[in-house]
Image (cartoon, rainbow, N blue to C red):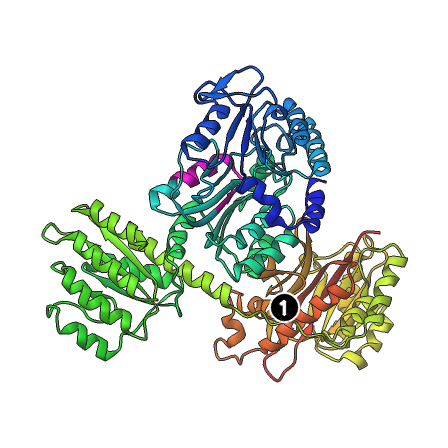
Amino acid sequence: MADSRSRARSRRRPALTQLDAIFRPRSIAVVGASRRRFQIGHEIVRNLVEGGFTGPVYPVNPSAPVVHSMHCFKRVQDIPGPVDLAVIVVPAPLVLAAARDCARKGVKGLVVITAGFAEVGGEGTERQAALMELCEKHGMRVVGPNCMGVLNTDEQVSMNASFAAATPTPGGAAFLSQSGALGEAILADARQLGLGVSMFASVGNRADVSPPDLLDYWEADPRTQQILMYLEAFGDPERFLQTARRVSAKKPILVVKSGRTARGAKAAISHTGSLAGSEAAVDSLLNQCGVLRVDSMKELFTLAAMVQAGKRPGGRRVAIVTNAGGPAILATDACVSMGLELGDLAPATQRKIARKVPEEAAVANPVDLIASADAERFDHALGHVLADRSVDMVIAIFVSPVMIDSAAVARVFAQHAAATDKPLAACLLGKSQGEVAVEILREAGVPNYRFPEEAAQALAGLAQITELREREVEAAPRFRVQKAKAARAIEAALAEGRETLKGTELHDLFSAYGIPIVPSLIVRNREEALQAVRRIGFPMVAKVVARELHHKSDSGGVILGIRDREELLDAFDTLEDRFRKPHPEMNVLLQSMRSSGVETFFGAATDPQFGRMLAFGLGGIHVEILKDVVFRLHPLSRTDAIEMVRGVRARALFEGARGKPPVDEEELVEVLLRLSQMLSDHPEIIELDLNPFLAGYRGEGSCVLDMRVRLQGV
């Protein structure tokens, strides 16, 4: 209910002016301010004052005359001047009364720190609904409930309206955390790593202000250069998709989405009071809108530091410059395993490097300058490597020997990083003068990693997010189809109260959309089976057809390789003996037997959060055993369909393996787009399987061997 209200409100008013009351308030009231140290109400007032908030701060507590050496008001209404933002820290049963007090004062933004709302269910859910009804009526935007607060490091605001112990360094990364406790860790780690923060929001239950709202707001903020998110649920996935797709083209978006495992998803439900989407749906949504999902908070920071440098690679080719062979080997292995390539340095580049390095140095990639390499040698080698056209990115590794000036080497790294438009990741190993060198790199904005594998991971992520942001999305074509014919097949099933289509209806539906179907005929008795030979021919396949029987091969309902009339009759009798008693309405489907090609799978399913999704992968029994399937949310663009076909791990089978010719991948792309058009035309379809779909080798033709469709329940 709250999500639908917030969506309606966001359509009526532009997000920027609404959220200014929260992120750029002129004055702040802290409702529930406390005189006792380490109480949340006290820490928020202290953070605002000591953080240098540029407007007045008004403590509100009817039981305390003074808080933090400031006059304390009994009610928000008693405050003499205007109040833009109220931070509410009172117990949950008192929040609604506090919000009414704010409404009478004309407050436009609330940050509700208090827990005990929808995340606990029952009375808490009712309490949250009442709060949102009041705020909707009075035009107040709400962050939370059950959150840690918000902050803005802009010197014109200097607001830390949270109970975080660490105040981050100002910079270009905006953070959203759906977990308050994790938000505390995010701010602490960001400061330690030198990652600058523009704004931060702990959104808690997302009763009102949600991830799409913040994406809208941060898109327009000139200080925000990248957006980092920890999410447990999306709220309004359709709006998130539309907003993130637009924003990610301008600013990188990195997401850690929890709930990958079944146990993790269950934890997310109890923690946030909202459902976590299936992993296939989450990955699909983020990929389609140009957002990079990372597996952990550590990886998020690893990559964010690289993105903060503001460089985009022109490709995936990496050069490694080092003074130690072991770390270079680790970096090489990590680069290759993460999909990067080691660029082949031009012979001219190698000759230039060789002029000023010892004979025992290696001038091919990785460039090993050996342990005696000083700042001058690194300067010489890095200059030539960065100038090489076969290099898109560089990892500069320095293991600090006692006799080498680490600070001087760090200054060389910083100078080259500033002089090139190619990303440079530093990796300083060893402790001799390490702190000084690390600080030089930090001040220069050069990402520095403790281990070579982290540097490789950062560059791989940077390459991936650059490709996501720069890809051109090609629209899907519209095909000429027989929409009315397909609609009649669907209406026939619905008229009989059936959720599934039967034989002729399936044939009519898919043939209407140009999906090639293997020659087939449903027969009811032995005589009809013999008559079908003229139309289908041998070899033949016989399959049982029954309403509640979906996985026919698992129960002996498929007989292959029927070569003559006698085998056909035996097959028909076998299926009758096995299935007639439990399925009196059963029939037998006879099909021409095809085996030349690769068995693939096309499917559609409806996710409870994200709606309909399309799937493609290896077919037959491999779907459930290998799970080599790629998902995308409906509707598909042509780019989505191409990525689905190319995203299968066993794609080598499509390209020709063990002397086999390749299959027609363009035909597979077209089938996906035709199915997407079918789903758009017929919203009644909530699930379908084409399994197996035999992708024929080029020139041989493809066809569906088995199909299933489920409609919205009637």
Q: What residue does disc 1 label?
A: 637
Does 20 sit left or right of 320 as displayed?
right
Above or below, 35 against 492 in this view is: above
Q: Up-down: is 47 above or below 502?
A: above
Q: Viewer-proximal residue, 474 or 153?
A: 153
* Dominant secondary structure, magenta: helix
Name the spot of residue 336 as percent of width and height, x first: 35, 64
Residue 388: in magenta span: no
Is residue 330 at least partly visible in the picture? yes
How many badges with numbers are in the image? 1
Looking at this view, name the residue that lies furthest to the bottom. 699
Residue 274 placement (x, y as % from top left): 63, 40
Seen in the image, is 144 located left or right of residue 491? Answer: left
Rendered position, 87 above or below 478: above
Where is residue 307 drawn, in percent x and y?
Answer: 40, 56
Quadrant of image for the N terminus: top right
Please tell me whether residue 112 is drawn above or below residue 681 in the rendered image: above
Which kind of residue does numbered mark 1 sit on? Ser
Q: Which sits in the foreground, 181 or 149?
A: 149
Residue 277 visible to an observer of this rendering: no
Q: Residues within 10 Å of mark 1 (few under 14, many from 20)?
A: many
Residue at 44% x, 27% y: name it.
46
Farthest residue in the right direction?
495
Which contiguous range is marked in magenta? 175-188
Foreground residue among 538 and 413: 413
Q: Position of residue 495 (x, y in %)?
A: 90, 58
Q: In what element is the residue under mark 1?
A: loop
